[in-house]
Image (cartoon, grey):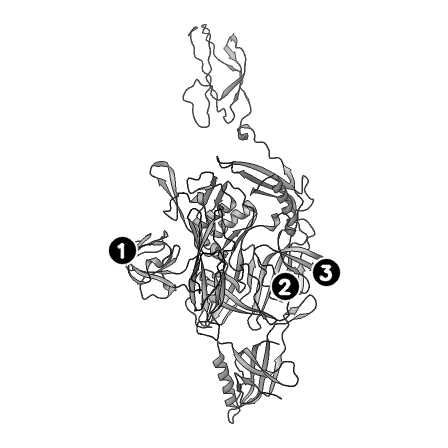
């Protein structure tokens, strides 16, 4: 593995448990039977359990980026099974979501997801 | 029109496409503020005396600028204005405005003039002539008297769309489409507020850079050889690109499907803006501009005005459509092309006629379609101040031009449709096109440039195509008038023509139709028209609906262009096969998804047809007297009591009624021709008998006959 998950050059405190490139939804099928896809991709990061500090870090990234569409995110290169990271700029963060409950001890947060959209060049 | 080259066509068919849209709402700059200084001012005031100037100078005010009136200086929100009115002129102490009765003027009111022109009607005025009780005097815009305006005429000045862009970008300025209806030479004067060059006298100045965010006005003044001029204004909004400064376009907005329809005259959509927004006035100018990518190529394609492809849509907030949702914190409103604004502005009925030597406002020199349209737009609306206009048909001589008391749009569109079978349509960038309908265009199948050669790689899902099996129209009769100006003298002559299609015998299916009142150049043209309309109304494929796979940004509802369709039998459920079949666009709908930045369009098309020329119908000869004369009347014999005293002369007096005028004497044969008389017979026991056959003069009728005998002495 080369690299790590970062947002605007800052490494995430807790690296995601899982990350995936969200499959593009087909806009339609052309008359030539070719599927038509949008140009942009999305990436989903998820954590089974996340520390409060890491969750706060994600929320801060979102709050700071709100209204300005440009964030640079370091993600595994699409379609590269070697799990090599590269920077994708001009991306948009959705607000991080989390599960309904907190662990009683130490406030750890379960089932956290962060979706990055407007990823180009793939 | 935008005809793409092969490289651009390849781009629009690229697999990875995305569009980022930006919403601009023009915020007019306050250029003048003062206070009403007239204790006797009241409703209907047109000349406003002012003092206490707090913003600008009267020299900053331009004709047709918008003025808002406020009760107090502390009323800074534009939506709190008590009235809006158009400015006509200004002096150091007074501002003359359009006639108005909707503002209850009062001393001390605040008047604010903005760097903006609204879409409005301009009213005519007719007053009695004090020197002649039977005459009236016409004025335009309340007190503009006729001198020679309809002889000199003027120019459709075109300056392209209203613009929006980011700081540091260049905007192209040119006068493409500008046309003087009298054929006069033209000179140009440009003023670029906020631009890196501030002005130019070139017809096409080219690119101007804008380095400071703000809202500006560009002015184009086109002067003809006689020294009179036409001015038009374009409004420019410059922003910081998001992430590069504080003055960004509106954020957090979404748009419903933007749909343009030729039948509706333009485009409409609905916009929602979330969060805190400034006050938005009705009829505010809206510009949607874009960044487009085709694969990795950042280029915008399309748009009818040269070098302005990033301007996707220009229109206005529809009056009365603003609504605020305070619970969910958003504002929603409808937007529409200038055609929608024209539908909300009502003008007065206008009548004009052609004249070789116009002497009043209702006479236009050697009137043609273009000249009539120019007259209406120039003197009865502010449209030419804020939009490009172009008539694409042949400029036919025309004797009478009449519009009803109707909206600006209906007045023009009704004239175009009834007299020319033409349509008034706004393109996506806000230009008004008056175009002859494709149904009556000669050689329509090849008359229009080809915008797209569409095959299966271009659409998604399955095209839907109507296949007409039975004719809609079985017989069509067209009637028109050719007006001959008369070589510059007199009032010209009008000749009527009739034509029918398919010919003498109707088809065996469909309905018969009559269309009359067309302006034409002669029988041959009318015959071709009737054949073309017949063919179009009976076209085999009247409707084709198709959804395209990408950002085909060069397609528009105006001007008319053809789309060639290739369809194989296995690509549609009806098994229809088409090869390069020409269609024209009726509607275009754009669906935009801001999350994946996909921008797709759907088309509704109609087949283009060429007709076989119809047959000439002889126009019935109008009988003498207009066909209203009476046949000959046989007056029965009338016996008169005898006067057997030897008086030899009997005279008959015919009393008749001629068109309501009762003859002043009884001894007139006016209007009667005695076609037969018989000798008096008699004397009989009962006197003398006369038989007379008379024929009335055409146009007169005999209301009654009385017989009176007057005894005269022989020799008298």
Span highlighted in magenta in the image: B358-362
| Mark 3 lies on residue | B568
Sequence-first tag of 1 and 2: 2
Q: Secondary structure at mark 3?
A: loop
Same chain for mark 3 and mark 1? The answer is: yes
| Mark 2 lies on residue | B9
Where is residue B333 shown, x and y percent of the image?
48, 64
Name of the residue lying farthest toward the left: B39
How far, Cα to Cα, is label 3 from label 2? Answer: 22 Å
Q: Main secondary structure of the magenta part?
A: loop
Q: Is residue B518 visible?
A: yes
Chain to which mark 2 belongs: B
Sequence-first tag of 3 and 2: 2
Foreground mark, 3 or 2?
2
Q: Is residue B281 visible?
A: no
Q: Secondary structure at mark 2?
A: helix
Chain to which mark 1 belongs: B
Q: Secondary structure at mark 1?
A: loop
The N terminus of chain A lies in quadrant: bottom right
Where is residue B520 shown, x and y percent of the image?
57, 42
- Toward the viewer: B69 or A38? A38
């Amino acid at each position: 593995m080369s690299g790590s998950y970062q947002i605007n050059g800052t490494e995430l405190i807790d690296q995601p448990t899982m990350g995936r490139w969200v499959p593009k939804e087909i806009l339609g099928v052309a008359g030539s039977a070719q599927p038509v896809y949008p140009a942009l991709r999305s990436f989903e990061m998820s954590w089974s359990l996340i520390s409060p500090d890491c969750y706060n870090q994600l929320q801060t990234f979102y709050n700071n980026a709100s209204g300005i569409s440009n964030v640079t995110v370091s993600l595994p290169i699409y379609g590269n099974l070697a799990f090599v990271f590269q920077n994708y700029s001009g991306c948009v963060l959705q607000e991080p979501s989390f599960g309904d409950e907190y662990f009683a001890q130490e406030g750890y947060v379960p089932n956290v997801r962060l979706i990055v959209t407007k990823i180009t060049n793939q | 029109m935008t005809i793409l080259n092969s490289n651009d066509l390849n781009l629009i068919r690229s697999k990875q496409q995305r569009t980022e849209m930006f919403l601009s709402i023009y915020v007019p700059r306050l250029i003048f503020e003062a206070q009403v200084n007239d204790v006797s001012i009241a409703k209907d005031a047109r000349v406003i005396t002012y003092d206490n100037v707090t913003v600008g100078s009267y020299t900053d005010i331009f004709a047709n600028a918008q003025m808002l009136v406020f009760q107090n200086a502390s009323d800074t929100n534009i939506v709190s204005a008590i009235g809006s009115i158009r400015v006509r002129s200004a002096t150091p102490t007074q501002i003359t405005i359009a006639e108005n009765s909707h503002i209850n003027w009062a001393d001390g009111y605040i008047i604010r003039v903005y760097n903006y022109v609204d879409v409005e009607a301009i009213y005519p005025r007719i007053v009695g002539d004090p020197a002649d009780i039977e005459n009236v005097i016409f004025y335009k815009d309340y007190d503009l008297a006729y001198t020679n305006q309809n002889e000199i005429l003027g120019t459709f000045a075109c300056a392209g769309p209203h613009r929006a862009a980011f700081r540091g970008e260049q905007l192209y300025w040119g006068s493409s489409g500008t046309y003087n209806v009298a054929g006069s030479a033209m000179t140009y004067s440009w003023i670029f507020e906020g631009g890196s060059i501030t002005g130019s006298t070139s017809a096409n100045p080219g690119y101007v850079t804008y380095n400071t965010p703000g809202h500006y006005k560009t002015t184009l003044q086109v002067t003809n050889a006689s020294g009179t001029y036409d001015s038009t204004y374009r409004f420019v909004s410059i922003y910081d690109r998001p992430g590069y400064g504080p003055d960004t376009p509106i954020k957090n907005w979404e748009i419903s499907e933007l749909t343009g329809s030729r039948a509706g005259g333009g485009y409409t959509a609905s916009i929602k803006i979330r969060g805190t927004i400034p006050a938005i006035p009705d009829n505010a100018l809206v510009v949607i501009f874009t960044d487009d990518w085709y694969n990795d190529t950042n280029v915008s394609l399309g748009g009818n005005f040269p070098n302005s492809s990033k301007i996707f849509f220009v229109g206005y907030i529809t009056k009365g459509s603003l609504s605020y949702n305070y619970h969910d914190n958003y504002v929603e409103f409808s937007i529409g092309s200038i055609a929608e604004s024209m539908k909300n502005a009502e003008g007065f009925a206008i009548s004009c006629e052609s004249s070789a030597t116009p002497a009043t406002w209702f006479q236009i020199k050697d009137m043609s379609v273009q000249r009539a349209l120019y007259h209406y737009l120039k003197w009865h609306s502010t449209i030419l101040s804020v939009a490009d206009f172009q008539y694409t048909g042949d400029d036919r001589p025309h004797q009478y031009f009449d519009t009803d008391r109707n909206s600006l749009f209906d007045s023009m569109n009704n004239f175009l449709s009834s007299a020319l079978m033409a349509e008034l349509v706004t393109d996506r960038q806000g230009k008004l096109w008056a175009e002859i309908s494709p149904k009556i265009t000669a050689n329509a199948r090849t008359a229009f440039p080809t915008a797209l050669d569409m095959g299966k790689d271009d659409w998604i899902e399955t095209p839907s195509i109507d296949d007409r099996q039975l004719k809609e129209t079985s017989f069509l009769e067209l009637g028109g008038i050719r007006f001959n100006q008369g070589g510059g003298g007199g009032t010209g002559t009008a000749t009527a023509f009739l034509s029918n299609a398919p010919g003498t015998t109707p088809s065996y299916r469909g309905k018969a139709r009559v269309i009359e009142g067309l302006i034409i150049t002669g029988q041959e043209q009318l015959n071709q028209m009737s054949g073309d309309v017949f063919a179009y109304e009976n076209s085999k494929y009247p409707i084709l609906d198709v959804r395209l796979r990408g950002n085909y940004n060069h397609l528009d509802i105006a001007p008319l262009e053809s789309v060639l369709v290739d369809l194989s039998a296995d690509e549609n459920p009806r098994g229809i096969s088409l090869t390069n079949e020409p269609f024209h666009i009726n509607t275009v709908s754009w669906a935009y998804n801001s999350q994946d930045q996909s921008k797709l369009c759907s088309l509704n098309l109609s087949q283009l047809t060429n007709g076989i020329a119809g047959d000439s119908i002889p126009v019935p000869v109008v009988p003498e007297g207009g066909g209203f004369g009476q046949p000959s009347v046989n007056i029965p014999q009338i016996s008169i009591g005898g006067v057997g005293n030897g008086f030899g002369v009997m005279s008959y007096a015919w009393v008749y009624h001629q068109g309501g005028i009762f003859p002043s004497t009884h001894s007139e044969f006016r209007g009667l021709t005695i076609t037969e008389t018989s000798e008096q017979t008699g004397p009989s026991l009962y006197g003398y008998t006369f038989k007379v056959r008379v024929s009335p003069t055409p146009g007169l009728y005999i209301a009654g006959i009385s017989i009176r005998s007057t005894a005269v002495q022989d020799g008298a």
